[in-house]
Every structure is written in C-alpha cells, then in structure tokens.
Image (tube, rainbow, N blue to C red):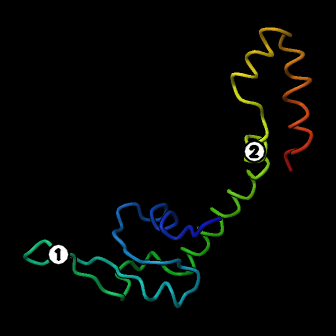
C-alpha cells in the first residue's frame, strides 16, 4: 500500500500538525519531518525537524504503519472481488429475471470461490 505515515501519526495523535514531502519509510526520513511548533506574527507556520512530540517515536509510528499495511493486505480478497463482480444493474436484472438463488449461484459464488477469504 502507499505510505501510511500521515494516517499513522493521525491515529496516534490526531491533532498533530506535520508536513513532509515524499514518503516516510525510514527513521532517517522521520528525522527530516517538519513539525509545526507555532505561527509567526504573519500567520506563517514555524517548523522544526526536532520532534516535539515525545509520544510519537519512530518505533511507535512505524508499528502503526505496519499495522495499517497488514489491515490493508488482509482485505485484498475483497478488493479483487469488488473488481470482478458484475455491475449492480446486471445483478438486479439477474435477480429480477432468474431469482436470488440463480443470482447467488451464477454471479456471486464464482467470484467468492475465485477470491476466498484467507
């Protein structure tokens, strides 16, 4: 999955303002993040690369990123199924003309069998 750094930080400390460009994949990247510590008299953000949030260590953020990746990976079968199912219009037409049992047997079960839950 794409980089989960921003989501991980927001999950761990929702109100944390942070800015970065690119992906945060290593502790070295983490140490280059711009952490907002205030605003100047013109309303411009004042940032530092020194992390002012002791509860947001690289270890904790990385663990949350890994958890988010595992959560995403665990639902791969559902994403594959969604792409393979016929359109809702086609499914409704099948139900209308042939009934729910036929719809399940011919349209739903083949996709579920092709991409089973793991």
Query: How many marks on residues?
Result: 2
- Secondary structure of residue under mark 1: loop
Q: Which mark is residue 44?
A: 1
Q: Residue at x 27, y 82 (%)?
A: 47
Q: Is residue 61 left or right of residue 47?
A: right
Is tag 1's residue or tag 2's residue first in the polypeptide sequence?
Answer: 1
- Secondary structure of residue under mark 2: helix
How far apart are the two marked residues, 1 and 2, measured between alpha carbons? 44 Å
Label 2 belongs to which residue? 78
Q: Residues within 10 Å of mark 1 (few under 14, many from 20)?
A: few
Image coordinates of residue 52 in percent, x first then y, are 34, 81
Q: Is residue 23 left or right of residue 40?
A: right
Q: Quadrant of residue 59?
A: bottom right
User: Is 84 or 61 nearer to us in this picture?
Assistant: 84
Q: Which mark is residue 95?
A: none
Q: Residue at x 87, y 37 (%)?
A: 112
User: Is 49 or 114 nearer to us in this picture?
Assistant: 114
Which residue extends farthest left? 41
Name the quadrant of the N terminus: bottom right
Q: Is residue 33 left or right of residue 76?
A: left
Figure check: 110 above or below 62:
above
Image coordinates of residue 58 in percent, x first then y, are 53, 81
């Amino acid at each position: 999955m794409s980089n989960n750094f921003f989501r991980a930080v927001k999950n761990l400390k929702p109100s944390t303002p942070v800015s970065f460009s690119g992906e945060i994949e290593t502790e070295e990247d983490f140490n280059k993040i711009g952490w907002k510590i205030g605003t100047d008299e013109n309303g411009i953000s004042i940032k530092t690369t020194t992390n002012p949030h002791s509860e947001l260590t690289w270890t904790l953020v990385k663990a949350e990123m890994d958890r988010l990746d595992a959560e995403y990976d665990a639902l791969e079968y559902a994403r594959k199924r969604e792409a393979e199912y016929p359109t809702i219009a086609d499914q409704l037409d099948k139900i209308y003309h042939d009934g729910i049992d036929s719809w399940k047997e011919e349209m739903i079960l083949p996709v579920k069998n092709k991409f089973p839950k793991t």
